[in-house]
Image (cartoon, rainbow, N blue to C red):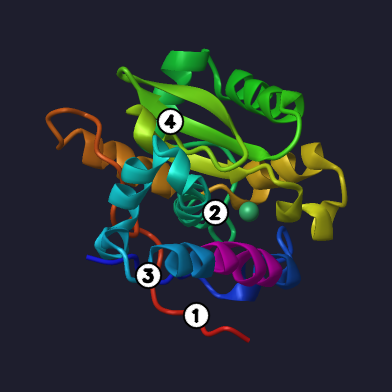
Amino acid sequence: MTVETPALPYDFPDLEPAMSRDSVVFHFLRHQRVCFDRMRALSRDTALGALGLEELIRVTEASPAHRALYRYAAEVWNHNAFWRSMRPRGGGAAHGLIATALAERFGSFERFTHQLKAAASAHFGSGWLWLVWRGGKVEILVTHNAVTPLTRGDTVLLALDLWEHAYYLDHQNRRAAYVTSFLEELVNWEFANSVLAELTRVPDGAAQWTHPPTGVRAERPVAVR
Ligand SMILES: [Fe+2]
Protein backbone atom coordinates (compact mmCIF):
# COMPACT_ATOMS: atom_id res chain seq x y z
CA MET A 1 0.00 0.00 0.00
CA THR A 2 1.31 3.43 -0.89
CA VAL A 3 0.03 6.91 -0.20
CA GLU A 4 -2.58 8.13 -2.66
CA THR A 5 -2.19 11.52 -4.28
CA PRO A 6 -4.32 14.03 -2.34
CA ALA A 7 -7.64 14.93 -3.95
CA LEU A 8 -10.24 17.55 -3.14
CA PRO A 9 -13.83 16.36 -2.59
CA TYR A 10 -15.04 19.37 -4.64
CA ASP A 11 -13.75 21.69 -7.35
CA PHE A 12 -11.53 24.69 -6.65
CA PRO A 13 -14.24 27.41 -6.84
CA ASP A 14 -16.96 25.41 -5.09
CA LEU A 15 -16.41 26.97 -1.65
CA GLU A 16 -16.91 30.53 -2.92
CA PRO A 17 -17.79 33.07 -1.76
CA ALA A 18 -16.74 31.91 1.73
CA MET A 19 -13.35 30.64 0.51
CA SER A 20 -12.01 31.92 -2.78
CA ARG A 21 -10.86 29.74 -5.66
CA ASP A 22 -7.39 31.30 -5.38
CA SER A 23 -7.18 30.41 -1.71
CA VAL A 24 -8.07 26.77 -2.38
CA VAL A 25 -5.76 26.54 -5.40
CA PHE A 26 -2.74 27.94 -3.57
CA HIS A 27 -3.45 25.98 -0.41
CA PHE A 28 -4.04 22.67 -2.12
CA LEU A 29 -1.38 22.85 -4.82
CA ARG A 30 1.31 25.00 -3.21
CA HIS A 31 1.11 23.64 0.32
CA GLN A 32 -0.49 20.20 0.59
CA ARG A 33 0.80 18.99 -2.79
CA VAL A 34 4.30 20.24 -1.96
CA CYS A 35 4.19 18.31 1.33
CA PHE A 36 3.06 15.23 -0.58
CA ASP A 37 5.86 15.56 -3.15
CA ARG A 38 8.51 16.03 -0.46
CA MET A 39 7.10 13.12 1.55
CA ARG A 40 7.38 10.89 -1.50
CA ALA A 41 10.88 12.09 -2.28
CA LEU A 42 12.05 11.28 1.25
CA SER A 43 10.43 7.83 1.35
CA ARG A 44 11.05 6.73 -2.23
CA ASP A 45 13.27 3.68 -2.58
CA THR A 46 13.03 2.93 1.14
CA ALA A 47 10.88 0.47 3.07
CA LEU A 48 8.83 3.43 4.28
CA GLY A 49 7.73 4.13 0.73
CA ALA A 50 5.55 1.03 0.75
CA LEU A 51 3.52 2.14 3.78
CA GLY A 52 0.09 3.71 3.77
CA LEU A 53 -0.19 7.28 5.01
CA GLU A 54 -1.42 6.56 8.53
CA GLU A 55 1.15 3.82 9.10
CA LEU A 56 3.91 6.06 7.75
CA ILE A 57 2.94 8.78 10.25
CA ARG A 58 2.87 6.33 13.16
CA VAL A 59 6.27 4.84 12.26
CA THR A 60 8.08 8.15 11.74
CA GLU A 61 6.63 10.20 14.60
CA ALA A 62 8.98 8.84 17.26
CA SER A 63 12.05 8.78 15.04
CA PRO A 64 14.29 11.87 15.13
CA ALA A 65 15.94 10.62 11.95
CA HIS A 66 12.62 10.91 10.13
CA ARG A 67 11.45 14.24 11.55
CA ALA A 68 11.02 15.94 8.17
CA LEU A 69 9.25 12.93 6.69
CA TYR A 70 6.85 12.80 9.64
CA ARG A 71 6.00 16.48 9.26
CA TYR A 72 5.27 16.21 5.55
CA ALA A 73 3.21 13.03 5.97
CA ALA A 74 1.25 14.50 8.89
CA GLU A 75 0.53 17.63 6.89
CA VAL A 76 -0.83 15.53 4.02
CA TRP A 77 -3.14 13.71 6.45
CA ASN A 78 -4.16 16.90 8.29
CA HIS A 79 -5.08 18.64 5.05
CA ASN A 80 -7.10 15.62 3.88
CA ALA A 81 -9.17 16.01 7.05
CA PHE A 82 -9.40 19.79 6.58
CA TRP A 83 -10.81 19.62 3.04
CA ARG A 84 -13.43 17.13 4.19
CA SER A 85 -14.39 19.34 7.11
CA MET A 86 -15.83 21.87 4.65
CA ARG A 87 -18.39 21.67 1.90
CA PRO A 88 -20.10 24.02 -0.53
CA ARG A 89 -22.98 25.86 1.17
CA GLY A 90 -22.00 24.37 4.49
CA GLY A 91 -21.96 26.00 7.90
CA GLY A 92 -24.66 26.78 10.38
CA ALA A 93 -25.90 24.96 13.43
CA ALA A 94 -24.86 21.37 13.94
CA HIS A 95 -27.39 18.62 13.41
CA GLY A 96 -27.67 14.90 13.96
CA LEU A 97 -25.25 12.93 16.13
CA ILE A 98 -22.71 15.73 16.39
CA ALA A 99 -25.36 18.19 17.61
CA THR A 100 -26.24 15.84 20.44
CA ALA A 101 -22.59 15.24 21.32
CA LEU A 102 -21.81 18.99 21.35
CA ALA A 103 -24.82 19.76 23.55
CA GLU A 104 -23.80 17.05 26.01
CA ARG A 105 -20.20 18.26 26.21
CA PHE A 106 -20.57 22.05 26.03
CA GLY A 107 -24.14 22.67 27.18
CA SER A 108 -25.20 24.44 23.99
CA PHE A 109 -24.07 25.00 20.42
CA GLU A 110 -23.39 28.66 21.22
CA ARG A 111 -21.07 27.74 24.09
CA PHE A 112 -19.26 25.33 21.77
CA THR A 113 -18.67 27.97 19.08
CA HIS A 114 -17.52 30.45 21.73
CA GLN A 115 -14.94 27.98 23.04
CA LEU A 116 -13.82 26.99 19.54
CA LYS A 117 -13.24 30.61 18.56
CA ALA A 118 -11.41 31.28 21.82
CA ALA A 119 -9.12 28.29 21.25
CA ALA A 120 -8.30 29.47 17.73
CA SER A 121 -7.53 32.99 18.89
CA ALA A 122 -5.41 31.84 21.83
CA HIS A 123 -3.10 29.68 19.72
CA PHE A 124 0.15 31.44 18.86
CA GLY A 125 1.69 30.70 15.49
CA SER A 126 0.96 27.86 13.09
CA GLY A 127 -1.04 24.79 13.92
CA TRP A 128 -4.37 23.04 13.76
CA LEU A 129 -7.70 23.28 15.52
CA TRP A 130 -9.52 19.99 15.93
CA LEU A 131 -12.79 18.59 17.11
CA VAL A 132 -12.03 15.07 18.23
CA TRP A 133 -13.77 12.12 19.86
CA ARG A 134 -11.91 11.17 23.02
CA GLY A 135 -13.10 8.93 25.82
CA GLY A 136 -16.71 8.93 24.71
CA LYS A 137 -17.14 12.68 24.22
CA VAL A 138 -16.14 15.49 21.90
CA GLU A 139 -13.19 17.72 22.74
CA ILE A 140 -11.62 20.82 21.22
CA LEU A 141 -7.92 20.31 20.62
CA VAL A 142 -5.15 22.55 19.26
CA THR A 143 -1.86 21.19 17.94
CA HIS A 144 1.32 23.02 16.95
CA ASN A 145 2.69 23.10 13.42
CA ALA A 146 2.20 19.69 11.77
CA VAL A 147 1.32 17.66 14.86
CA THR A 148 -1.66 15.39 14.23
CA PRO A 149 -4.13 13.79 16.67
CA LEU A 150 -4.00 10.63 14.58
CA THR A 151 -1.36 9.04 16.77
CA ARG A 152 -2.83 10.19 20.11
CA GLY A 153 -5.80 7.86 20.20
CA ASP A 154 -8.20 10.63 19.23
CA THR A 155 -10.65 10.29 16.37
CA VAL A 156 -10.88 13.41 14.24
CA LEU A 157 -14.37 14.80 13.64
CA LEU A 158 -13.35 18.19 12.19
CA ALA A 159 -10.08 19.87 11.27
CA LEU A 160 -9.38 23.57 10.80
CA ASP A 161 -6.03 24.72 9.47
CA LEU A 162 -4.63 27.57 11.59
CA TRP A 163 -1.56 28.19 9.45
CA GLU A 164 -1.72 31.72 8.07
CA HIS A 165 -1.56 30.39 4.50
CA ALA A 166 -5.07 28.98 5.10
CA TYR A 167 -6.70 32.40 5.41
CA TYR A 168 -4.33 35.16 4.35
CA LEU A 169 -5.59 35.55 0.77
CA ASP A 170 -9.21 35.94 1.91
CA HIS A 171 -8.88 37.45 5.39
CA GLN A 172 -5.26 38.71 5.59
CA ASN A 173 -4.24 38.35 9.26
CA ARG A 174 -7.80 38.18 10.64
CA ARG A 175 -7.90 34.64 11.96
CA ALA A 176 -11.13 35.27 13.88
CA ALA A 177 -12.94 36.22 10.65
CA TYR A 178 -11.72 33.00 9.04
CA VAL A 179 -12.97 30.87 11.95
CA THR A 180 -16.34 32.63 11.90
CA SER A 181 -16.65 32.03 8.15
CA PHE A 182 -15.77 28.37 8.67
CA LEU A 183 -18.55 27.98 11.24
CA GLU A 184 -21.19 30.00 9.42
CA GLU A 185 -20.52 29.13 5.77
CA LEU A 186 -18.25 26.13 5.37
CA VAL A 187 -18.28 23.53 8.12
CA ASN A 188 -19.35 20.08 6.95
CA TRP A 189 -21.35 18.57 9.81
CA GLU A 190 -22.11 15.58 7.59
CA PHE A 191 -18.44 14.65 7.81
CA ALA A 192 -18.47 14.70 11.62
CA ASN A 193 -21.73 12.75 11.62
CA SER A 194 -20.35 10.12 9.24
CA VAL A 195 -17.35 9.57 11.54
CA LEU A 196 -19.56 9.36 14.62
CA ALA A 197 -21.84 6.88 12.86
CA GLU A 198 -18.79 4.79 11.98
CA LEU A 199 -17.59 4.89 15.59
CA THR A 200 -20.82 3.34 16.81
CA ARG A 201 -20.01 0.33 14.64
CA VAL A 202 -16.40 -0.03 15.80
CA PRO A 203 -15.98 -1.94 19.08
CA ASP A 204 -12.93 -0.06 20.37
CA GLY A 205 -14.36 3.31 19.41
CA ALA A 206 -11.04 4.57 18.05
CA ALA A 207 -11.36 4.19 14.31
CA GLN A 208 -10.11 6.93 12.03
CA TRP A 209 -12.02 7.84 8.92
CA THR A 210 -10.65 6.08 5.88
CA HIS A 211 -13.04 7.02 3.11
CA PRO A 212 -15.05 10.03 1.91
CA PRO A 213 -18.05 10.62 4.13
CA THR A 214 -21.61 10.46 2.97
CA GLY A 215 -22.68 13.64 1.27
CA VAL A 216 -19.52 14.51 -0.58
CA ARG A 217 -18.58 13.42 -4.04
CA ALA A 218 -16.16 10.59 -4.58
CA GLU A 219 -12.52 11.53 -4.59
CA ARG A 220 -10.79 11.92 -7.88
CA PRO A 221 -7.37 13.22 -8.90
CA VAL A 222 -7.01 16.95 -9.40
CA ALA A 223 -4.52 17.95 -12.08
CA VAL A 224 -1.75 20.40 -11.25
CA ARG A 225 -2.43 23.63 -13.16
FE1 LIG B 1 -2.46 24.32 5.28
What residue would you read off at disc 4?
132
First reached walking from the N terminus: tag 3 or tag 4:
3
What residue would you read off at disc 1?
222
Which residue is drawn at the image coordinates 34% and 59% (left, top)?
212
Viewer-nearest of discs 4 and 2: 4
The magenta segment is: 25-35
CA gap between label 3 and label 2 equals 32 Å
Label 1–label 4 contact, CB within 8 A: no
First reached walking from the N terminus: tag 3 or tag 1:
3
CA gap between label 4 and label 2 equals 16 Å
What residue would you read off at disc 3?
44
Q: Nearer the viewer, residue 125 or 105?
A: 125
Label 3–label 2 contact, CB within 8 A: no
First reached walking from the N terminus: tag 4 or tag 2:
2
Q: Is the residue 126 above or below the residue 113 in the image?
A: below
Residue type of the residue flagged with mark 3: Arg
**Label 3: few (<14), some (14–19) or many (≥20) C-alpha neighbours in 10 Å:** few
Q: Is the residue 191 above or below the residue 130 in the image?
A: below
Question: The N terminus lies in which quarter of the figure?
Answer: bottom left
Q: Is the residue 130 above or below the residue 137 in the image?
A: below
First reached walking from the N terminus: tag 1 or tag 4:
4
What residue would you read off at disc 2?
86
CA gap between label 1 and label 4 equals 28 Å
**Label 2: few (<14), some (14–19) or many (≥20) C-alpha neighbours in 10 Å:** many
Q: Is the residue 195 above or below the residue 99 in the image?
A: below
First reached walking from the N terminus: tag 3 or tag 2:
3
- Give residue 155's quadrant in the image: top left
CA gap between label 3 and label 4 equals 32 Å
Give SS at disc 1: loop
Q: Is residue 8 visible?
A: no
